[in-house]
Image (cartoon, rainbow, N blue to C red):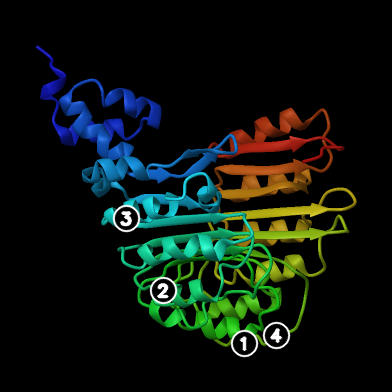
Amino acid sequence: MYSPEKVPLDILQPLLDHLDRRDLASASLVSWSFNRAATPLLYRTLDSHVKDGNVLLHPSLTLLRRPELAQYVWYVTETGAVQALRQIDPCITENITAALRLCTNLVSATYVDDTDTPEANFLPILKVLTTLPLKELIIRTHHDVGERAWALLNKIKGIHRLSVWSLNWGPPRVLQGWADLLSPTLTHLELGRCAGVPPTILISVFLKLPLLRDIRLKGVPSAAIPAIMACLPNLIALDTEYLGSGNYRVPSTPLPALQQLTVRTGSVDVLGPEHLWTWTRSLLPHMGSLQSFALNSFAVYGQVTIPWPFVVSLARRQRESLREFAVGVAQLTLDSISHLCLNCPALETLICSVASPDAGINCQSDRLRASTPNAQPTCLVGRGWRG
């Protein structure tokens, strides 16, 4: 006869791992064995936030009362908004840092702060994080976290994934002084504020990070992107902006073979920024490597139109590998859509706006599906469509 007590833990946990937190909490009440399987999953990811302005939702008190639960915590998100409630609860910071010290298996920490005092909020938490075996660190703030925080950050090593986004105030942070310690491990990097940093400094930093496989950059001069790529032989995913043409030396080192490319740009012209398409092709010198191309764009007048020569070139060079072509509200003609589907047999996803919708589009879509059975075209149809 079936009994929940007899279900092995190694079978239960993979099944329960698909449940959301509410269902996990219910599962933990079913039986002792279910509780033993669900509890580590419930505490694997902890998030702190403020509800209704002054109601604090934070797991620190639970961990302090039951410290044995801290061993299950892998991912933590802390916020500056919680720290702002010090007037209501003077012990907030002490409780948070004390609970965080118990999480000796922590591998990922995210810090989010939209207050005007991120340094005062972040420093106590950061001092604890420097003692834990972090593999991933995400920092998203409105204001720079300050020199004292960066002095501590520059001592952390062993990070595999790093994301730093400060929207305004303070100098851009591009890992100067930290790259040497990150060099042996860092594979994924997001830098959200590189505007104003000379390309020579950026290149000197990336030369120290040869293991990078995935980067997202905001504010980097477009002309310097090929030179940065040339520093990263293992790079397979790039997410960057096109900020206009410029002059920078062409790298003599071959560029890595990108598998994923995301370009973000805007324009006052429906044909897109000048030289955008030539620049994009220059990032893809290898045939048969690109699996995903994404364009996030807007135009002040109308919608960005992807030119026919770019579509033909991409389909010819990435024929065997291209699986996803997602350009959002950017327009493709029906001929361009047909060309992609007929010439890229691996294509699974096509997301675009259609430049000239007409009554024949359904017949055209049926024909494309027949010729490319893997494709799942999603077309935002409409001459006056707005995103």
Mark sitting earlier along the chain (1/4): 1
Residue 167 higher or lower than 355, as above or below: below
SS assignment at label 3: loop
Residue 341 sits in quarter: top right
Label 1 vs label 3, nearer the camera: 3
Circles 1 and 3: CB distance less than 8 Å?
Answer: no
**Total numbered labels placed on residues in the image:** 4
Assess disc 2: are there few (<14), some (14-19) or many (≥20) residues with their C-alpha within 10 Å of its C-alpha.
many
Which residue ends up furthest to the right in the rendered image?
301
Mark sitting earlier along the chain (4/3): 3
**Residue 313 drawn at (x, y percent):** 68, 62
Front-lying residue, 52 or 43: 52
Mark sitting earlier along the chain (2/4): 2
Circles 4 and 3: CB distance less than 8 Å?
Answer: no
Q: Dividing the image into 4 quarters, which one contains the C terminus?
A: top right
- Give the residue type that dot 3 points to: Leu
Assess disc 3: are there few (<14), some (14-19) or many (≥20) residues with their C-alpha within 10 Å of its C-alpha.
many
**Residue 195 drawn at (x, y percent):** 69, 73
Q: Which mark is residue 211?
A: 2
Q: Which mark is residue 200?
A: 1
Residue topped by disc 4: 248
